[in-house]
Amino acid sequence: MELRPFPTVDELPVQKELPDPFLRADGKRIASPREWKSLREHWLALILHYQYGELPPKPRTVRAERTDEKTLPDLNAVRAEYRLYIETPIPLSTRLLLFRPRRRGRLPVIVDGDLGWGEPKRDIVEEATRRGYALAFFDRTQIAPDSPERKGIYEAYPDYEGGRLAAWAWGYHRVIDFLLTLPEVHFRRIVATGHSRGGKTALLAGVTDERIALTAPNNSGCGGAGCYRYQAPGSETIADILRNIPYWFHPRFQQFVGRVERLPFDQHIVKALVAPRAQLSTEALADLWANPEGTQITYLAAREVYRFLRAENRIGIWFREGEHEHSPADWQALLDFADWQLLGKAPARAFDRLAFAQREEVYSWRAP
């Protein structure tokens, strides 16, 4: 979605503060929520161009073949396994597990691309299905490998330059294509979540697909809900992530190593592009590499956009003790937030409680 020629890195201005999300390309600030839609398109184009790359083309069809189904009587749920087929020039497929409670009516569904790390733990399935949620886990690495190899989607589109995060986000969209064909799925209650690199992916999936009602990255850090301009001690930087895993991003992103102040956005703007749809970041205080303090900063900055759109209660953050994992406590927080945002149930916990002192010097702008 390239709306205009993009400046080179040398042409981009130095911005020590987090960039102002309300600032148009002509240097004027928007004043009305009606102006956000066109400004959002501008920001999305910048973010895809410089950081992630465009997503692959939408396929002609998506279909699924059920390969196994069994009842889980002790959970009053059903576990169904599918092979999801995606019609691209070289066909793709991925494994999909769907857990659903045995009850009438359309269900909210949580989509998670982390199946490549193993099936979800029983207590997570039990809690989600008890509350009336379906869980759809797929293996994003069957869409594109988590390696430099240009297989999967890259074989289907040999000229495709987007990074793995963009390719995997596209995989979330294809799973949603299928889920919306099922009569038991509620089309307005779709959640995208994932852990670590899966959390980065879930955030981008939520930005780029408005069918996702709640976007919930977990411990997503650098390239996800973290912050590039503010790096707490011990946190992962652009230089770190691009030295170790450059293929997650578009090759253009390499130009910002050592020049982060020329990046025309930061991750608060990525998070703001989900607005006014619901969004939750779940974070672990000992997961220093994922920059939980920087994630608090992007939460507060993105909340200004939510406030501007009169949706301040639709963005949340939640911290726990502990380290880098998608823990049962994280899932409990996600389900509480989903109950509130999608089902209208008042939460028993706060989703605006901060873990760190606010740093006023990181940005001086506020919502108009």
Image (spheres, rainbow, N blue to C red):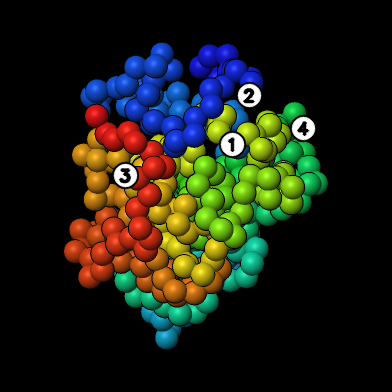
Say whether residue 20 is left or right of residue 287: left
Q: State the residue position of label 3.
A: 303
Comparing marks 4 and 1, which lies closer to the viewer? 1
Image height check: is 187 above or below 4? below
Comparing marks 3 and 2, which lies closer to the viewer? 2
Give how far apart the Cα atoms at labels 3 and 1 are.
22 Å
Q: Which amino acid does label 2 sit on?
A: Val
Give how far apart the Cα atoms at labels 4 and 1 are.
30 Å
- Whether residue 171 is visible, yes or no, is no
Give how far apart the Cα atoms at labels 3 and 2 are.
28 Å
Q: Which of marks 3 and 1 is nearer the N terminus?
A: 1
Q: Which amino acid does label 4 sit on?
A: Pro
Give how far apart the Cα atoms at labels 2 and 1 are.
10 Å
Q: What residue type is labelled 1?
A: Val
Q: Which amino acid does label 3 sit on?
A: Arg
Q: How crowded is mark 1: few (under 14 residues within 10 Å), some or many (20 or more)?
A: some
Q: Which of marks 3 and 2 is nearer the N terminus?
A: 2
Q: Considering the numbered disc 3 on the image, is that residue within a helix, a strand or a loop?
A: helix
Q: Considering the numbered disc 4 on the image, is that residue within a helix, a strand or a loop?
A: loop
Q: Are marks 4 and 3 in contact (CB under 8 Å)?
A: no
Q: Which of marks 2 and 1 is nearer the N terminus?
A: 2
Q: Which of marks 2 and 4 is nearer the N terminus?
A: 2
Q: In which quarter of the image is residue 130?
A: bottom left
Q: Quadrant of residue 37?
A: top left
Q: State the residue position of label 2.
A: 9
- Most foreground residue, 73 or 233: 233
Give how far apart the Cα atoms at labels 2 and 4 are.
26 Å
Query: How many numbered marks does the figure carry?
Result: 4
Q: State the residue position of label 1.
A: 260
Comparing marks 3 and 1, which lies closer to the viewer? 1
